[in-house]
Amino acid sequence: MKDIDDSKAPLLDHLIELRRRLLWSLAVLALLFFAALYVAKDIFAFLVQPLLAAGQGRVIFTDVFEAFFVDVKVALFAALMLGFPFFAMQIWKFVAPGMYAKEKRALLPFLLLTPVFFIGGAAFAYYVAMPWALHFLLGFEGEVGGVQRDALPGVGNYLSFCTRFLFGFGAAFLLPILLMILERVGLVSVEQLKKSRRYAIVGAFAVAAVLTPPDAISQFMLALPLYALYESAIAAIRLTHWRKGRSETLSETGVEEPAKNTGPEAPPGGGGVGGSGPI
């Protein structure tokens, strides 16, 4: 990619480029949508596995069109998830020409890590958080005042439950990347992040209350990893600063960094087995 000084363009060219990126993104979204619609029932069968593992083997629909629209929503959900790396790359290709080469080198690793963290958050939601939440919520079944209370989740409600968990956890797991980008551009410092731990705890539970269903188990399942990610971001920033300071010190003193994986270090005195004189 060229530096910003070599890639100046008028506003009209930027608008044309934006339209081209949007059209490509919409075309890929449409292609993925129709492909996912063909296997929508298989995708929904995968999504209901946590519900089946929690002991609920039946879902219902009370509206004539509900099952059809659930398949459409499943296909759109799958298209957005599968197309996320492509959409992020289109955003990068539109924004990158307006950045300096140094800024590109600084932000590109975070862009590449974004899908990894998002998928990690969605996987945590599917394999850990959702089973715990479903076991807790379905535990309210039983007899109440002589009346049997049964859980009969609707397909539309369960799909909304899944998407809130998967998108919520996926977006929340991007917190370390967001904090490192903010620190890299100078909007926050590691000292400010360390002093704001109490606010981070409150913020983690507030975000969990918005992104998860209204039960304590689900909120704790998101708030605790969210705060752990906050601490991991602080540790990663401190490690980055330490490595940067170490490399600057070595460059100023003219000392090269020692080679890695070259065996054990030599002991003081040269590392020979014996001396130069007689034994």
Image: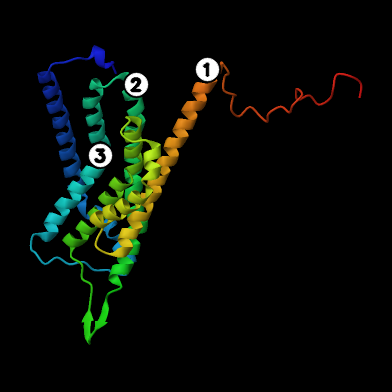
Q: Amino acid at mark 2?
A: Lys
Q: Residue at horizontal 30%, vertical 33%?
A: 187
- The numbered mark, 2 or 1, whose residue comes first in the sequence reads 2
Q: Tag 2, which secondary structure?
A: helix
Using the rendered view, name the quadrant where residue 88 is placed.
top left
Residue that carries the numbered disc 2 in the rendered image: 102
Q: Amino acid at mark 3?
A: Phe
Q: Is residue 202 left or right of residue 276?
A: left
- Is residue 44 visible in the rendered image? The answer is no
Q: Residue at horizontal 32%, vertical 49%?
A: 122
Residue that carries the numbered disc 1 in the rendered image: 252
Q: Is residue 5 left or right of residue 110?
A: left
What is the distance, in whole Å, between disc 1 and disc 3 at their CAs? 43 Å
Q: Residue at horizontal 11%, vertical 24%?
A: 15
- The numbered mark, 1 or 3, whose residue comes first in the sequence reads 3
Residue that carries the numbered disc 3 in the rendered image: 84
1 vs 234, nearest the viewer: 234
Identity of the residue furthest to the top in this view: 6
Residue 236 lies, in percent from the top left, at 43, 38
- Is residue 207 visible in the rendered image? The answer is yes
Using the image, determine if residue 60 lies above or below residue 159: below
Using the image, determine if residue 213 lies above or below residue 197: below
Q: How is the image coloured?
A: rainbow
- The numbered mark, 3 or 2, whose residue comes first in the sequence reads 3
